[in-house]
Amino acid sequence: LKKYKLEVMLSVKHLHLKHALQTVCTLEAVILRSFGPEGGQVLFTRDTGQAMLSCSGTQILKALRLEHPLARMVVECVWKHSAVTGDGSKTFVLLLASILRLIHAAASKAPGVSQWSTEAAEAATARHLADKLLAFAMTELDDLICVSVAPHGFCVSSEDFTTKTQLPSCPNGFCVQALLSSFFHTRLDYVHCDFLSGLACELLGHWKFQNDTLSFALQFLNDNFPALHTQVSGFPVSSSHVIEGQVIHRDFATPCLQVNNQPVKAVVVTEYLQPKLLRRGDMLDLGCGGRVTGEKSIIPFSAWTERSLESVIATLQSLGVSVLLCAVKQSAAALALAAQAEMCLVECVSEEELSLFVRLSGVAPISDCWMIQPENVATLTFCKPIQLGAHRYADNLITSFKPCSLVICGSGEVQTEQYASAFQDAIRMLFTTWEPTRMTETTALKKPVQSHQCTSLNAHNLTEDTVCRSSDVYVLKPGCVIPAGGTFEFLLHHALLQHGRSCSASNYTNTGVGVSQILADALLTVPRQIYSHNLKSFLQTQTRVTSFTSNQPHHFMLLKNARGTTEDPEKGDEPSKLFTLDSGLESVSCKHQLLLAVLQCLTICCVDSLFIRALIFKPAAYLYSFYESKIYVRCFSLFRSSIMAAVKITHCLLHLVLV
Amino acid sequence: MSRLVKKSPSVCTDLPLDNADICNKLRLMRELLGSCYGPTGRLKQIHNNIGGRVVTTSSSSVLLPAIASSEPFVNLIRTSILHHVRRFGDCGLFAAIFCLSLVEQAKQSGLRAKAVIRSNEHLASLCTDYLKQGGCGCKVKLDLCSGRDLVALARSVVSSKPACVLTEPECVHISRLAVRAFLLTVPCDTPGSVSLGQTVRVSVEGLPVTHSAVVPGLLVDTAEDVYLSQPCSLPHPLVLFSASLAGDLSELGDGLIEVHPRVDSDSQVLSQLLELGNQVVRDGVKVFVCQKVIHPVLQLYLTSHGVTVVERLGVTLMEPLIQLTGAQPVATLHSAVQPTAYGQVGGLSVRRFGSKTMLHLQACGESAICTIILCHRNETMLNELKVTCQKAEHVLRLALREPSALRGGGCTETHLAAYSKSEVPALGRGCSQTEYLRAAEAFCRSLESVARSLEHDGGTSTIDPTHAHRWTRPSDVATERRGVGAGCCGCGSLDGRETWTSAEFPPADLLRDASVQPGVLDSFTAKLNALQVAVETANLALDVRYVIRDVN
């Protein structure tokens, strides 16, 4: 340790708020090209030469391979956020940039700044504001969203997936599709979104388990998505479809003969069918009679392996097995004997496909060929070759279970890859939307509602449609959605302003006003960018949302009206064009999590105006393990606990070396 | 560990379509591929910069892999088209030229990318819906019962590959062979779902093209002095080994075997092999085939007992041979060959093609396996001919699924352009009427430019407003009246006597006279997919805002 310590050189560099702002604004400029309805896609090549196409903020930012430590850390935060929710990576950067800008503006004109320490004071104010914002988000934002935003949306219950496939006219099923469709709009070419969201709904409808909760099904799909989809290039996207059965991405090694319709019996084999006589390191001694084996010839050994293979095949045949799924490549003799016994054999099946098969069929794989039990035999409805593009695969349908797989077509690998990753993110997004509400610590420790009753007087008039009230705190119900196109931002903006006003009226504190004002202003950036090519509709939307909230302070669902149902005949004549399903839907809980993630990232950006750059000239290996961005996060957490001015270099140094 | 290098930041190109370098590359690619299009297309020679093999081609399946670019944006378009060619085997150049000119036209029009994308998508779906309709003016129903339509379809594939260097009779000969080979792979009396057989291609260099032939059954390479058993009892039993019979024991594992000097493992293994040979001879097998190598002593033993031996068959011929003979491959050396594993050969003869001696195996009953022998004067032409035949077979198989064809010679493109112009704009979201009209104009111009790229000899391409067909006027014929002297239109269903009057859609009906069949046909399925893939790829290219290149 000491040896390395000597070779470590630390350069302390001042990072002013404006530098942080500059960095984040650069990221924002990159992201803006692919944001909103006019946004395009980004083509990038990996270091392997493989090309990829994406509209996802995370992938774009990661592909940039940025050097600036702060930028890398922001990218890391975005990545962490989108790995969980699958959504909102572009809005993340947008919000972060706009909040930073506002904080910078607020800090630079903060009163009482003396001449010599302008920057230090600025940084202190900024840090203070960032902490306040986070504190505000942790305590009050949750309730604010529940009270002022969620009632304007509505809940899509988890049963809607199943009804969708049978009744395409069912409005709620349509809602799930609209939700998916507007998600795909942020990630893919505009024209195929409706088609793909229909496909996703179909897939989800198939996978909706009988007794399990929706979130379980979504989790399952997310975990097994690689084994459940097949990418086919050379066809238009509209050829994508859902097929019955699980596709094993390997061809039959023996000719597939069967045409009979009776149930097919299958086993999973993880080892060689023909036993290997000698393992690596073993030695066979031939010719010295009686010392080890007494054999003078290799022939009996070779014959023994063949005989044991024959007996394994005979056992399988007696069990009526006709499909073998093997994890390894089998010998030519095994293939030939299996073919003679009229068994279909699939070799080199990937581990994840086998584990999915085992999980769905509920049988144990065979690892020891001498111990084959009837419990190892799965029953399939069919097993047939299927030609998808250039490859022929094996397709299985397990009787007890009706799996189905997705075939994603595109004109090239680049495109199919993009569709597949968008699909997976869509599943994550749905999972976040329908995530069962947990009473986490923050929820439990939250201040009771009474403390900010001033926020909305109408809170108690709410029906229990989207929000359920439990032990004095509001909790968002799973599956709450709201019309897309900036509605969430407008509503929250409005609510935040009201909150600030009422707080200042009740002389709560002075800073609370600033915080909610900053957040409210920052939120407006998102719709402003969405409508950046059409400012008129920005104003129209804003006016409409505001008028809704002021005219109907009570529970009122924007969408019910728009769908033209006759539940509110007296309001049916109200022009609500903007809230038709045309504009799509988005998930409230995703937005909520996004806001929290942004504010958490913000504190990291603002907390210190100093950071350390560790440069170790020797040995080189250390340099790069340090250079990973984690180190900066650790540095910052270190700094947060210490005083900004008195950075203990030695302490930090030790910390760095220990990492 | 000491060689770790810091990752360098990526190189970022903003708005690739505004980049002059990328635009130049795209234009170059369009000109290059456009010059290869059609029967009079110019040939391209491909070779690397240190010499090596020279390939002469004009076919997209050879050309596209060869023109890999360092620019990922160009590669994006290239690979998309290449995937289409691999799936459908035809219309690759059409897709490439159409896609590239769509991009170019969209850039020239100066419209918003999103507006162009939406109108392109709309127009493409209009066109595909129209093509799928029964009353579509450029679709021709194929009569699978008559060979004429099939030959016409195969001929337009063969004639569009000038690198094969075929004369007119040779072209007809090859098209007939392709159709014949295709018909041989269709099984006759199989109830239920039909699975097509296989065509094995054998190429022989140095013989004239007219020596090419199609034979039912399989031709396998064999030694010069092959021994043929007496044609006494047909059919001959056949045994097929998939394991090596060279005397190696490969399945024992990774461990070591220590052999003492007194032990002669080789002869022990050989005697085991001979025992196997003995059993096979006792069972009356006349043909002994092995995928891998056979020990020379075993070979000698078998031939001395009147068995025809074929070794090193290769894995590609295994499946056709199994289908042909009904044999099951054997891989066990220590147990007797099961009687069920033997196959049957209906006929056995030796055939010579130029320098090649081949054993001709025929099926006992009916089988869907056939071999096509392709002859040509030199290697590069032969390679192109092989590719061409493969494509023709692919196109014919596609026709089996969807028995329609489209008018070739550029007439489908001009017809579609006329159709798209006539359709009233249906306005989508985010695209105004003006934008749509201008985008539609660019779309039609791109379609027409594809049709126009068929002409390479300096002639002028014209489109008649009555039938919306494409006509060419050679440059050396100075005619004063349009239409006259132009011979016939691109697809060959109209001749110059027709008068052009109206300019309305739908164009005048051509199929009043059912006997007028176009002479040039394109595959329906392939062209439909090509159209969709081209539009999708162009839309994608227009949508790309950044190119980020990781330079590590």
Image (cartoon, coloured by chain):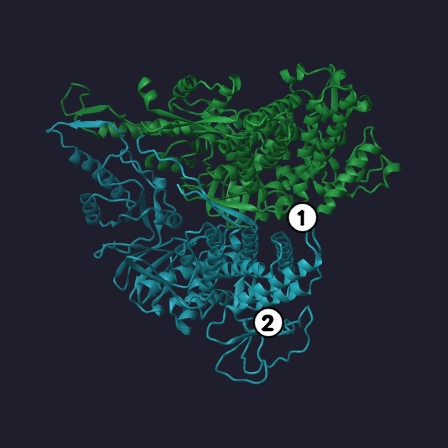
Decide: is A50 above or below A226: below
Q: Nearer the viewer, residue B269 or A223?
A: A223
Decide if residue A461 is on the left or right side of residue B520. Answer: right
Decide: is B252 above or below B551: above
The chain that appears cyan in the image is: B
At numbered mark 2, what does the secondary structure look like: helix, strand or loop? Answer: loop
Quadrant assignment for the C terminus of chain B: top left
Specify whether residue A244 is in view: no
Q: Chain of mark 1?
A: A
The chain that appears green in the image is: A
Q: Nearer the viewer, residue B219 or A469?
A: A469
Q: Residue furthest right?
A: A570
Give the mark toward the camera: 1 or 2. Answer: 1
> Any mark on residue B365, and which?
none
Decide: is B431 above or below A628: below
Identify the residue at image location x=29%, y=66%. B206
User: Residue flagged by tag 2: what amino acid is it?
Assistant: His
Q: Position of residue B85 (x, y in %)?
A: 47, 55
Residue A7 image-quadrant placement? top left
Q: Nearer the viewer, residue A151 or B369?
A: A151
Residue B431 image-quadrant placement? bottom right
Q: Decide: few, some or many residues near mark 1? Use Cα within 10 Å; few <14, some 14-19, many ≥20.
A: few
Q: CA distance from mark 1 to mark 2?
A: 42 Å
Q: Position of residue A28 (x, y in %)?
A: 57, 39
Q: Pointer 2: what residue? A: B469
User: Residue flagged by tag 1: what amino acid is it?
Assistant: His
Quadrant assignment for the N terminus of chain B: top left
Q: Residue furthest front?
A: A115
Q: Pointer 1: what residue? A: A533
Q: Position of residue B56 (x, y in %)?
A: 36, 63
